[in-house]
Amino acid sequence: MTLAFAAPGADDSMRGMLLGSIIGDALGTPVDTLGKGHIKAVFRTIEGYVDPEPALKNKMDRWKKPGLYSSLAQLMIVMAACLAYGKKNGISEFERALADMPPVEGSAHAVVRGPGAAERYLLNCVRGQNADAVRHAFPCARPVAIIAPAVALCSRGAEWFTDAMRASLLFTSDITTAAAAVICAGLLRRLGGMAEARGDVDIVRVARDVADAVRREAEENPQCVFECASNPDAFAVAAGRFAEIFGAVESAAGLAGAESLICALAGRDMTNKAAHATVNHPLYVVPYAVFICARFGHDPAGALFAMVSEGGAAAASGCVAGSILGAAYGTGWIPDTLRENLVNRKKLSACIDSLIQGRASFDMVRDFIASEAPLTAKEMQERAAREKHNQPKRKKTPSGSEKERRLTQHVVESWTKLDRAKWKKERKKLDRRNDSE
């Protein structure tokens, strides 16, 4: 392995990367899968944690608690800790931690909240519930949001490349997702190492350079990809596509122009082309998040709000954007309201401190997972209460006599109209006959 980006050096960059990722997840989760137009119509602008109830239109089963992060942040923290204390066995420790999670009554996925298809596949596998299932093979941006901050901070030396690949392959066999995870991890490490140049960093150009370096690494050192049971040529092609898209959006004039370029390039070989760059696909989400972070570089908080306001895969894109902004700008840009209203902030702060100071352990992972159980149960209870309170009004079922009355009325009205029409027709015939005489 020749590609060795240094891990983030400044404590503030490391803390910003983790905290930004968690806050981005908490901001995006309530509006995840909602369209940009719908979000704008209901909330106008997003500048904090929002209650999604007004936007759900009697679909309260999709309600998420404001300020509460989802499976993305949960799994990211667990993975980071396992990589830190497990070292070369970090990925195996991550699987063991997921397998040992305590059950939560009413939850099919223990303490994990709102997992996507790729996360559900992994959770079922490690718990022995997917023995005969076909391996998940679809591209997905959510694993990238989980893997990149964990690997960027906690992988040792040049092992970050293979750690990111192996972690990605736990969720899906898709090679584009694996390339995105490696590129994002490398980007975070590169940005964290440039902390002294804050304000002067061209994030899109750095992302393009990282993607190009990852592509060259796969071409010149294919063994590192083979070790992860993947095809080096396919991986290099995927990394090259990210470099191409990053290069194209460097000169984009605005969000609409960047989105159009990303959709055109990412969907070039796809049958079903996406119209928005917020679909749950790494070729769309990652370049769009990078562009928005660069576009609003003078206002990192505004960049994160803008990213989440785009809707679509808002949790994944918010998580990716938050980690990039944190690595590039530290924690000073994060508004106090987002810190103070973040659910479970004290436990999160303690976990982040342990990760930064190299004190991560199995006990830390166990304690964090235990602290998540009541939060998951509480959210489920609140959702059930809101579903009960907001049930749509059902139409009253008419009685037998009422049905008969309505049918009689319909028949009478129908025959009356028919008779009137016949009468008019006969009268016209009679009038013409009289005129002719």
Image: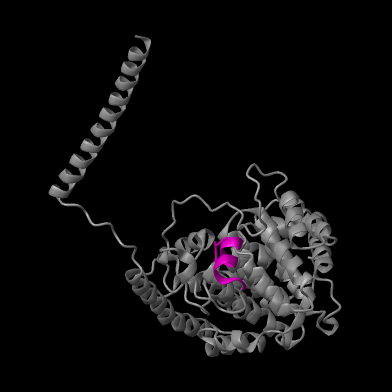
Image check: 65 left or right of 274?
left
Q: Nearer the viewer, residue 160 or 149?
A: 149
- What kind of colouring is applied to the model shown? one colour
Where does the image place residue 430, in percent across and percent down from the top left? 31, 17
Whether 229 is drawn above or below 46: the answer is above
Q: Residue at x 55, y 84 (%)?
A: 342
Q: Tell me residue 414's x, y (percent).
A: 26, 34
Q: Position of residue 80 (x, y in %)?
A: 61, 77
Position of 264 relative to 290 (above/below): above
Q: Image quadrant of residue 188? A: bottom right
Question: 328 or 276, which is in the foreground?
Answer: 276
Q: Is residue 97 left or right of residue 270?
A: left
Tell me if I can see residue 89 in this picture.
yes
| Residue sitting at x 86%, y 78% | 200
Number of numbered labels in the structure image? 0
Is 434 placed above or below 385 here? above
Q: Residue at x 66, y 62 (%)?
A: 165
Residue 218 seen in the figure: no
Q: Can you name the residue that lies furthest to the left here?
A: 401
Q: Quadrant of residue 332?
A: bottom right
**Vertical placement of residue 36 versus 422, above or below:** below
State the residue at coordinates (69%, 56%). 283
Residue 89 in magenta?
A: no
Where the C terminus falls, by quadrant?
top left
How far from the left and from the top, in percent, is residue 175?
66, 54
The answer to if 39 sits in the magenta stretch is yes
Residue interval drawn in magenta: 32-45
Question: In which quadrant is the N terminus drawn?
Answer: bottom right
Residue 35 falls in image quadrant: bottom right
84 left or right of 363 in image = right
